[in-house]
């Protein structure tokens, strides 16, 4: 195997890891289907990928932080989640995004998680 082939394989592995961390296909499906902003879709995709509550700092690092380490104020997370809850209610989504009391962590209710997976999975197969 020559150097170019090796780099192509490494590049593909890194792309797959990036998709796992950022939501990849799910992010785009959620964004288009529900008419979400990039940040709202990023938060929702992250919460959908994790079956446990996600800490506010993790959400900030994964969705809002820029490559140079800068980003908006931390309050932006609460604002985007508030807007996301309203958008989901308008779309007729069952359940909600809940805040784990005293932990500054967010999670999807089981019925909302099931509803979102039903949206994402058939479209992933078509893609």
Image (cartoon, helix red, strand yellow):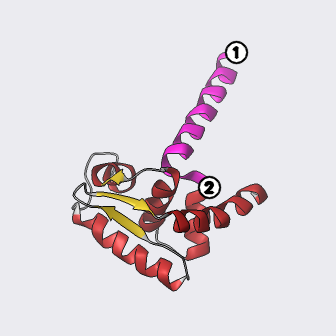
Q: Which quarter of the rendering shows the C terminus?
A: bottom right
Q: In which quadrant of the rendered view does residue 33 lie?
A: bottom right
Q: Position of residue 105 (x, y in %)?
A: 31, 56
In the rendered view, tell whether residue 22 sits above or below residue 106.
above
| Magenta range | 1-24
Residue furthest toward the top? Answer: 1
Q: Secondary structure at mark 1?
A: loop
Say which residue appears at 60% left-offset and 27% top-offset. Answer: 10
Q: Residues within 10 Å of mark 2 (few under 14, many from 20)?
A: some
Q: Position of residue 28 (x, y in %)?
A: 59, 62
Say which residue appears at 23% left-offset and 60% top-offset. Answer: 74
Residue furthest toward the right? Answer: 126
**Residue bearing mark 2:** 25
Residue 90: mark: none
Q: Earlier in the sequence, mark 1 or mark 2?
A: 1
Choose between 125 and 73: the one closer to the eye: 125
Choose between 31 and 104: the one closer to the eye: 104
User: Circles 1 and 2: CB distance less than 8 Å?
Assistant: no
Residue 2: mark: 1
Spatial CA distance of label 1 from label 2 is 31 Å
Say which residue appears at 47% left-offset and 65% top-offset. Answer: 109
Q: Position of residue 62 (x, y in %)?
A: 39, 50
């Amino acid at each position: 195997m020559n150097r170019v082939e090796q780099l192509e394989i490494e590049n593909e592995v890194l792309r797959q890891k990036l998709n796992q961390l950022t939501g990849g296909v799910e992010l785009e499906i959620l964004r288009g289907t529900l008419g979400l902003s990039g940040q709202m879709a990023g938060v929702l995709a992250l919460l959908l990928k994790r079956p446990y509550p996600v800490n506010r700092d993790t959400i900030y690092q994964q969705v809002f932080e820029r490559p140079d380490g800068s980003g908006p104020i931390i309050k932006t997370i609460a604002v985007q989640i508030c807007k996301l809850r309203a958008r989901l209610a308008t779309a007729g989504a069952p359940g909600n995004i809940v805040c784990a009391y005293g932990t500054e962590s967010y999670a999807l209710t089981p019925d909302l998680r099931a509803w979102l997976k039903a949206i994402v999975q058939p479209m992933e197969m078509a893609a």
